[in-house]
Amino acid sequence: MTARIRWVGWLCALLLLTSSAAMAQKNDPCAGCHKDWSKVLPKDHAAVNGGFQQCRTCHKTGTDGTASVNGFATRLHKTHAAGEHKLACDTCHSWVDGKSFGLIGEDANLGPVKKEDLALMQQKMVTWADGPFTDHLHAKAKVDCAGCHAKPVPVSDATVENPRCLECHGPVEKLAARSANKEFPKRNPHASHYGSDIACTSCHKAHEASVVMCADCHKLWKLNIPGAAQ
Amino acid sequence: MSKNEISRRSLLKTLAAGAAMAGGGFALNLAAPATAEAMVKKLPATWDETWDVIVVGSGFAGLAAAAEAAGAGAKVIILEKMPVYGGNSIINGGEYNAWDDEFHLRQKLGLGDDSAEAHMKDTIKGGDFYGQPPLVKILTDNATPTLNWMIDEGGLKLREVVNRTGGHSNYRTHTCVEGVGRGYTEALKKIAEKRGAKLVLNTSITWIWRESAEPDSPVLGVEVKRGKKTLNLKATRALVLASGGFSRDVAMRQIYNPSLTDTYNSTNHPGATGETVRYAQAVGAEAIQMAFIQLYPYAEPETGLLDAPAVYPFRGPGFGIVYVNKVGKRFVNEMERRDVVSRAEMATGMKPTFSIFNEKMIVKMGTKEEIESGIARGRFVKADSVAELATKLGIPPENLTETVKKHNQYMKDGKDPEFNRNFTKVMIPLEEGPFYGIAQWPAIHHTMGGLRINNDAQVLDIWSKPIPRFYAAGEITGGIHGANRLGGNATPDAAVFGRIAGVNAAKEKPLA
């Protein structure tokens, strides 16, 4: 009886020790790679001694539809989620499959992210962070995922309906006025023969090259669209 | 390799083994009870959505079916795979053949007589007698009431013109104010939505669920793809296929006519592909006359576009329009059907050909505004004399002058010794300017073949039996227009049979 209690006690102590050690390292996802911050920070950046949490005291990442002031999220995703230093999402993000997704060491849960959505999400974050597409144009205007998709973080088959786009870009008449063709008034992609039933995303693709759908049939009609392939 | 392929393969293996053991007494056929089709794809255990009537496609036929089914109290969904509604219908030429309308426009404009019977005769003859007379009769008898229905309930507005178009013996081709099919789709959509039908875009069907391969087993619903999600939708009363033709499906059209390669333009929207016909065949439907594929003779030569100007050469024959080739010579009887004109154009060996008309014809067949905007866009060419027009079009002026002079004389004589054109009193000679010309060339336009239906728009199986709770209407069906569809007959076909399908779909007793 006594021996058994003692044994359980030892086990608990061991668990506590290992988990607190893991906690210390887990709270600073940067520490594994970045021993010396001066190598990666701009020259005029204030000295950094603490870990990731210290970065966060200045650099906020919006979860309310606006990205942080100096593009912290775009810059980190650009350098960590793609290219030669491409890392797995859960290097920096706390993630429980199908339950929660946040930043290591922070409480905020951005939403229930499933394993099968992770790769796609990473890909979208990369084009959002940098590139020629509409998502990066939004990033530059300080609009993050929630800006278009609302909360929680979008899943793989998420789409954006017209009213959401029109909250910022509307009304349709305003868009039609901007794309009006004085010489040929009928050649207006925002006032076409499809009326207002057409989804904005028919042409304006967020995470891939935008295309002028009109040109599928009106092949001789040359029209520029922001976020097109380059 | 997908799970379906695996199961199909193992099924075939099992059957082969069985056949060997049974000494040839066992064969795979679609009518074998509860085997083939059910084994290929297992019926869903649960349904994501349940509707009374599911309509596939949102053109004339789909919207008309949805309107009638919803009007009879059914809960109706219209599935559209494209990001926009309307398919080919919304971009079609806006022409609607009916012997009469509630304003009696033909009579009012002094354009002679007509009847539903005459319309029927022309349609059957124009399709080389391949069209099923009872189906054609339904089309031509109901074209007028359905036109009036769209006017009265959908707010459709017609232009004050009636044309006599290729293959028709009378003036019966009506045009909506918009001059494109949108006039009719807006009217039909208005009626359908007013009656409670729901339209969803970006949703393509990926399978048709039929209970089993028993000949009298019903269609139960569809599997659809919406975004990356696969959903199963149950239809407690019926499924209506109204998903159009396959003009833009190069591989499919070449199965039936190998000469229709990808070098041909098409007037159709990009979604005009034939997968829905295949899903229907996979559950036992019969598809007929698939090789009858129509070219539109007057499309924009470079792109194949059927824009507003491209409808004028089609509308013009009844008022005296003249078709000439690149050297300014006539090459066909302008009153001919689309297949004849298209073949004659290609036989000139010179792309493109041209339609020539004058100022006086414009108000008879269209509007001055359309002509003006067409000139601004470089589609129509205008000149004060025939010779000047020829020069502008790149035609030897002396040839065109001679051709027009001869044709004017033929019209006066009432006899065309060259191409045997049949003249009428309302035709206008090309004497007074200004004159107009427009370039034209054939592009793939309409697939006359498709699912075989009966008079109630029920889809028939290979034994000529209706497949329970399964309807089809519009360009996806075959056997109505025959070998060649007369221009202006597609809209009444789709709207009339769409309505019939919708009425009958709603009448089905709901499944548990």
Image: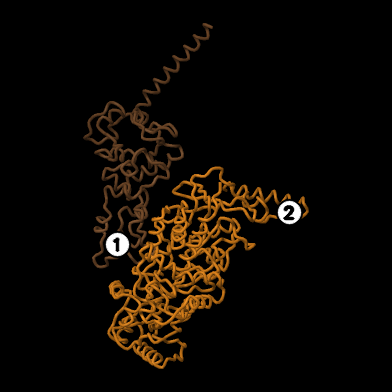
Chain colours: A brown, B orange
**Front residue (pair B210, A107):** B210
Q: Visible in this render: residue B245?
A: no
Q: Amino acid at mark 2?
A: Phe
Q: What is the x, y in percent for residue B170?
A: 44, 80
B120 with respect to B402 (left or right): right
B430 with respect to A116 (left or right): left
A49 with respect to B448 (left or right): left
Q: Extreme top residue here?
A: A2
Distance between the alpha carbons at the discs numbered 1 and 2: 63 Å
Q: Which residue is mark 2?
A: B26
Q: Which residue is mark 1?
A: A188
Q: Residue at x 42, y 39 (%)?
A: A118
- Same chain assignment for discs 1 and 2: no
Q: Chain of mark 2?
A: B
Position of B323 relative to B311 (above/below):
below
**Front residue (pair A159, B234):** B234
Q: What is the x, y in percent for residue B176?
A: 36, 69
Q: What is the x, y in percent for residue B346?
A: 47, 78
Q: Extreme left residue here?
A: A44
Q: What is the x, y in percent for residue B50?
A: 49, 47
Q: Amino acid at mark 1?
A: Asn
Position of B124 relative to A179 (above/below):
below
Q: Which disc, if any, is residue B293?
A: none
Q: Quadrant of residue B96?
A: bottom left
